[in-house]
Amino acid sequence: MNLSPLFFPTLALYCLCFKLTSAACHVDDEAGLLAFKSGITHDPSGMLSSWKSGTECCTWAGVTCLVDNRVTAISLSGQSEKPNSFLSGTISPSLVKVQNLDGIYFQNLRNITGKFPDLIFGLPKLKFIYVENNKLSGQIPSNIGKLTQLEALSLVGNQFSGSIPTSISELTGLTQLKLGKNFLTDTIPVGISKLKSLTFLSLQYNQLSGSIPDFFSSFTNLRILELSHNKFSGKIPTSISLLAPKLAYLELGHNALSGQIPDFLGSFTALDTLDLSGNKFTGTVPKSFGNLTKIFSLDLSYNSLVDPFPTMNVKGIESLDLSYNQFHLKQIPNWVTSSPIIFSLKLAKCGIKMNLNDWKPKETYFYDYIDLSENEISGSPIWLLNQTSDLVGFWASGNKLKFDLGNLRIVNTLKHLDLSRNLIYGKIPNTVSGLESLNLSYNHLCGKIPATKFPASAFVGNDCLCGSPLAPCKA
Ligand SMILES: *[C@@H]1O[C@H](CO)[C@@H](O)[C@H](O)[C@H]1NC(C)=O
Ligand SMILES: *[C@@H]1O[C@H](CO)[C@@H](O)[C@H](O)[C@H]1NC(C)=O
Ligand SMILES: *[C@@H]1O[C@H](CO)[C@@H](O)[C@H](O)[C@H]1NC(C)=O
Ligand SMILES: *[C@@H]1O[C@H](CO)[C@@H](O)[C@H](O)[C@H]1NC(C)=O
């Protein structure tokens, strides 16, 4: 076949034109996005610097265009580790011009203020709202139930107040409802039980009160339930037992829940994180916990739980906190000692009466935090601290540790060291000056205190320490 020499340039031109028109930004989308930009008063990291009138809006940072070249999503996200990475201002109501939006993702912008963006009610295709870690305030609108097309609603980390509107029960397409870290009050509307597709329900860090509704029989898909840091009282509702096959996260910590920890929690075969800390639970930890073979984070601290603690059959616990109950564990349990992946162990006031020299954990490499305060532990942590390489905090106040502090290896990563109220002797090594917090009070230390920023209360009650911040050494 002979092609006309003219054919190729024509084709090339045709393709180029097609590409340009196909990528062109819809005039309404451009207007809506630029209106949003004009509502931003401060953008120190230049997050919106590519948003310029007359340029191709589908290429602007954070803008996604899909079908028919219409803008379908805006994703702007501040980086928490960069102090400059924020936006100040409000969300312009004219953003409603971007009619084909199906997702708004404004995450960690930190300084966006104003009320719930009502323009959302004018966006019929919007399915995903993630407006997280900003400073939106006021009430969540009572007609929120009109947004029936929503699949995810996250307002985590704002300043919303008032109660959760009852009409939220009409958002039956929601798979994720996250309202944590706001100032929400009142009880959980029982209508939430109509949200049968929920996989993720998070209401933590609010001021919600009353009992946790016994409405979980409808949540057969729930994987994550976060209700911690509220004011819930009463018992763990029995219908939670129906979540056993799938629930992976159960966080109920820091409420005022009471009663016994129910047996049925032991049958949660998919559970990897359980936090019941800071409540008023009494009685024993059910034997059925031995069946929680997948659990890797267990926090039962600050309750009134009593012995005996069940033997766990977990292969690798990562994080365990049993502190401040009424346990008398005597030893650090074997299932802890044998964990190959543990990074945080907190067993303060657990009635442990062992010699630390006898504790040889299978793996020390991952340890970040060890808290053995307020036990009757003797011996020395010298071997242990010499084994760890990433330790950040070691707390062992109120024990019977007896060793020469000068021999303790203080790894570079260590930030917090509390050895107060033990039987420690020797001199304070210079290496403590790199710590962020230190307490060596009430031991048998002697000699000149190296230059540090720590107050006198970190050094008082020793045999013969001297120098700032205590009295000067005698010449
Ligand atoms: C937030 O905005 C206020 C007022 O616009 C400003 O004073 C403040 O520096 C901003 N800071 C951050 C971190 O967002
Ligand atoms: C652990 O589970 C098995 C069967 O799955 C059951 O027979 C046993 O009673 C459970 N153990 C406890 C302590 O609940
Ligand atoms: C600390 O460990 C090193 C090897 O990693 C070893 O040479 C040294 O003797 C140990 N020190 C103490 C006090 O155990
Ligand atoms: C050190 O511990 C003692 C006794 O446990 C306490 O009274 C004091 O406030 C603590 N000081 C610091 C700086 O943590």
Image: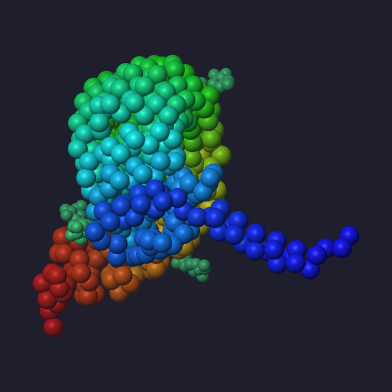
Q: Quadrant of residue 20?
A: bottom right
The colour scheme is: rainbow
In which quadrant of the rendered view does residue 122 lie? top left
Q: Which residue is nearer to you in this view: 356 or 315? A: 315
Residue 3 is left or right of residue 312, and the answer is right
In this view, the residue in front, 228 or 268, is 228
Residue at 39% x, 53% y: name it: 30
> Could you say which quadrant of the image residue 428 lies in?
bottom left
> Which quadrant of the figure contains the N terminus?
bottom right
Does the rendering let one see residue 89? yes
Residue 406 x/y as whole percent: 34, 70
Q: Residue at horizontal 44%, vertical 16%? A: 217
Measuring 31% from the left and 52% from the top, which residue is drawn there? Answer: 36
Query: Where does the image place residue 343, in percent across and percent down from the top left?
Result: 45, 50
Q: Single out the residue that lies furthest toward the bottom.
A: 475
Which quarter of the rendered picture does the C terminus lie within? bottom left
Q: Nearer the viewer, residue 221 or 135?
A: 135
Residue 309 visible in this rendered orientation of the protein? no
444 or 299, which is in the foreground?
Answer: 299
| Count of number-bearing discs | 0
Q: Quadrant of ligand 2?
A: top right
Give the image location of residue 188, x and y in percent.
28, 24
Residue extending farthest right: 1
Q: Residue at x 54, y 33 (%)?
A: 293
- Please, is residue 102 above or below residue 86 in the view? above
Q: Position of residue 145 (x, y in %)?
A: 33, 25
